[in-house]
Image: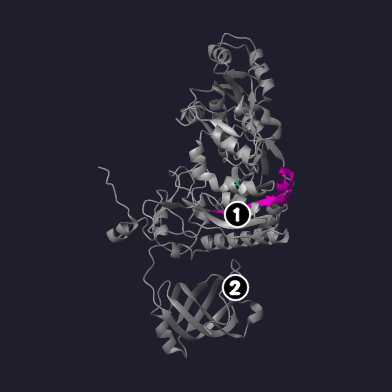
Amino acid sequence: MYRTKTCGELRISNVNETVTLAGWVQTVRNIGHLVFIDLRDRYGITQLSLSRDGHAEVFELAGKLGREYVIQVTGRVTERTSKNANIPTGEIELLIDQLTILNEAETPPFTIENESDGGEELRMKYRYLDIRRPLLRDVLITRATMIRAMREYLDSKNFIEVETPNLIKSTPEGARDFLVPSRMQHGTFYALPQSPQILKQLLMVAGMDRYYQVVKCYRDEDFRGDRQPEFTQLDCEMSFVDQEDIFENFSGMVKHVFKKTKNIDLPDFIRLTYADALKYYGSDKPDLRFECKIVELNEALPKSEFPVFNNAIAAGNLVAGVNAKGCAAYTRKQLDELTEFVKASHRGLSGLVNIKFNEDGTVKSSVDKFYTEEQLKEIGKAMGAQKGDLLLIAAEKASKVRKSLGDLRLELAKRENWIAPGSWSVFWVVDFPLFEKDEETGEINFVHHPFCSPHPEDLQYFDSDPLRVRAQTYDMVMNGNEILSGSIRIHQRDLQNRVFNKLGLTEEEINHKFGFMLNAFRYGAPPHGGCAFGVDRWVMLMTGGETIRDSMAFPKASNGRDLMMDAPATVDPKQLEELGVAIIKKD
Ligand code: ASP
């Protein structure tokens, strides 16, 4: 037996027991005739001590130990004289009788402690050492606890876990496919699943009724923001359900996971329509841990000669603002920073009007030339302004104003610490549109994926005004992050065909890409719907990480590289030949 106890286990009640531990040397402190060693494993840290008296040989061996050596020790548990209240084993130490060095270790490239001296790239290259740090170890443990709780809940509700293949045909989720060339049939390719979407729908046709899978998905996207080329979904599908069944079932699951993982009882989840989410928060995944709604002002503005607002209204644009509560004392510099923030190219506003409701009762604005104090107060009333508040108003194309003010409210929350630590906001966003128009090409695209069912009430607009058609699509939003997407699916072949046609696919393309699915729909497809959770993001939120890299064992760096394995890498030309693949060099 390598060990009889773990390094996180011994307590005062174990005093006088003789035990064997195995683990990694965190630190060695040598003080004359005494040696103290902190021994670490996944479960914790135990202090070992050794005195030269009567243990000359062992003492000499201990002198050879370095950081991260793997050792085995046997000894007697004793009560410590100076206790450490910060760790569960802090009341005891182990007096070493026997010491075996199981493996030596070179000095690690960074310190293996929560506050490490290693930069992120270095730690990614040596991820196996990084995972020895309690911080990352605890994330992986929480991740496992969460996934266990998900399975527990779904198993109790009669779901069954079914594995679906990775070598398949393209399943569109709006991203580029990773392709795998076939050696047996040159010139043909498998696609790695962007999600098991079609397969899980076929499992419903197959009568499986309730399916789930913890599954890897692959999307070859540019490295915008917080993405990984492969990530994990909890993918689910149910037959004979409507949206209400889905909301009930998965609200229940999320609550169960919170209870099991963090002992938190979440309140019931509200529902927000997509239209309201955009209107009031400028985002389809708003953070509702603080108020600060966007207020539309087109109807509420008093008469004035101010050309910016007048022109915007005449052009059918939107005038809207947010009330930055308590920010009236912002300096010129702070206001300039906020203006620069909304002017950034991906937001694209040309400026912000500000109105300050000062503590002394005066009102000052950047448009004093055009509005009387009375008129400014009228605007203030529309926006719920009180003494001490700062109003920030934009007037441009509605989509730009909403996006910018949506981002601005988040920025203000950050600056002003409006979000209480440890607070949670979880809710559903419903009634997404079925289609959207690409602003550049004018093409009609799907919003979620092409298998979402239109809202029955809106089918009447399908041909005349497709952008008006709402889908039976929903997201779950957690602290301003989308952690679930799903929909009731189309289960009728004709309707599915109509959607493909609307998306501009020719009959030939439909047959080539989705013929097998449409064919399956000939044989009794039940009404069905489902969803998928982004597991990595959810874990990130539950563990306080900043990116989804922080929530997976072996992530890729931001340029898509695996720094530890050094992948992607070149391959032997013979392999390429076997695959019938030629490399075209770009100059
Ligand atoms: N397949 C979808 C996705 O990956 C989820 C779903 O509609 O169930 O977003």
- Badge 1 marks a residue whose secondary structure is strand
Q: Is residue 421 above or below residue 159?
A: above
Q: What is the CA distance from the residue labelled 1 to the residue labelled 2?
A: 37 Å
Q: How many marks?
A: 2
> Residue 547: where, in percent of width, then height?
51, 49
Residue 502 or residue 58, whichever sits in front: 502
Find out if the beta carbon at label 1 lies less than 8 Å from the nearest ligand 1 atom.
Answer: no
Q: Nearer the viewer, mark 1 or mark 2?
A: 1
- Which one is in front, 410 or 154? 154
Coordinates of residue 133 in the picture (x, y in percent): 49, 63
Disc 1 designates what residue? 234
- Residue that appears at 36% across and 71% down: 106
| Residue that carries the numbered disc 2 in the rendered image | 89
Residue most toward the left?
587
Q: Which mark is residue 80?
A: none
Q: Position of residue 237 (x, y in %)?
A: 65, 51
Q: Are marks 1 and 2 in contact (CB under 8 Å)?
A: no
Q: Is residue 237 magenta?
A: yes
The magenta-colored residue range is: 232-251
- Closer to the chain start, of discs 1 and 2, is 2
Amino acid, disc 2: Thr
- Please say if 439 is above or below 166: above
